[in-house]
Image: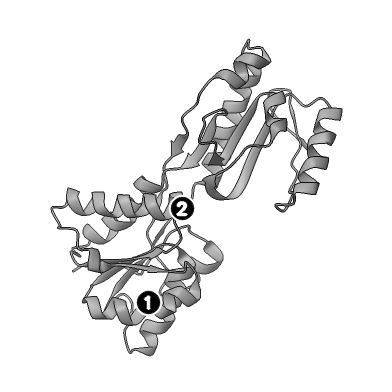
Amino acid sequence: MKPGVNGKILLVVDTDGRKDVERRTFSFMFEHQVEGIIYSKWVHGSITPPDELGRMPSVLVNCYDECGRFPAVVPDEVQGGATATRLLLEAGHRRIAFVNDAAPSPASVGRLAGYKAALARFDVDFDPSLVLSVTADQEGGYGAAAQVLATGATGVFCHNDRTALGLYDALRESGKRMPDDISVVGFDNQEVISAHMHPALTTVGLPQYDLGVMGVRTLLRRCGADNDESEIVSERFKPVHVQCPAVPRDSVRTL
């Protein structure tokens, strides 16, 4: 338990994705008569909310219920993808490859939509041959390098920083220098990766802090609302999208 504000006590539990731990956690919380619950996932995506959330004011963070039964706070993947692409466009790049995650998800779909929107805003035609689908990890980025070079792209937007790390390694083995020969932008701002790459990786951050703040504020409003339980579960909510900030470093060259 952690001391909080507004006269509240904050109880934080990491269930490590285990349903048995989750069930015990809910039982513990109900025994201690908590006023509300913030339910968060490590990866942004759609979930089937546990039935227990319907017993009290609850807010979803970094996940959402497609039926809209609970308020949800999620990253703005479209805006984030547009921001990453714009970092390259504003530096003069017009032939920009996008190394995306092959698995469908709010992140892969949203970031692709943002990539397309940014190109359109700069009057650059979308070229589907510049979009490469890989596993969104270091191995996927490494394997994408030959295709990236074949496109003739001067800049690359990678689905995440781990993908960019693998791409860096393969590009170096091909004799390329970043950003002199090719500029690279990542996503997530995993500082243990991005800040220590050479050159340090320009990226777009996932707004974890802001997601948490917005989630708590939303829950406090729900707890303070004069609603009975039937009203709490009968409303329909659209996710609130939190902007993903640009994190400029050293991996983009101005043409």
Q: Residues within 10 Å of mark 2 (few under 14, many from 20)?
A: some
Coordinates of residue 216 in the picture (x, y in percent):
61, 31
Q: Going 57% across and 19% down the picture, which residue do you hit? A: 234
Coordinates of residue 218 in the picture (x, y in percent):
57, 27
Report the number of discs.
2
Q: Looking at the figure, which quarter contains the N terminus?
A: top right
Residue 82 seen from this side = no
Q: Looking at the figure, which quarter contains the C terminus?
A: bottom left
Q: Circle 2 sits on which residue?
A: 105
Mark toward the start of the polypeptide (1 vs 2)? 2
Coordinates of residue 133 in the picture (x, y in percent):
37, 67
Q: Would you say 25 lies left or right of 59 here? A: right
Pick the front one: 253 or 67: 67
Pick the front one: 146 or 214: 146
Residue 78 seen from this side = yes
Q: Circle 1 sits on which residue?
A: 144
Gap in angstroms between the C-alphas marked 1 and 2: 20 Å
Label 1 vs label 2, nearer the camera: 2
Q: Going 34% across and 89% down the picture, which residue do you hit? A: 174
Residue 146 in the image: above or below residue 29 = below
Coordinates of residue 233 in the picture (x, y in percent):
61, 21
Q: Please tell me whether mark 1 sits on a helix, a strand or a loop.
A: helix
Q: Going 49% across and 46% down the picture, which residue do you hit? A: 207
Pick the front one: 48 or 147: 48
Give the quadrant of residue 115.
Answer: bottom left
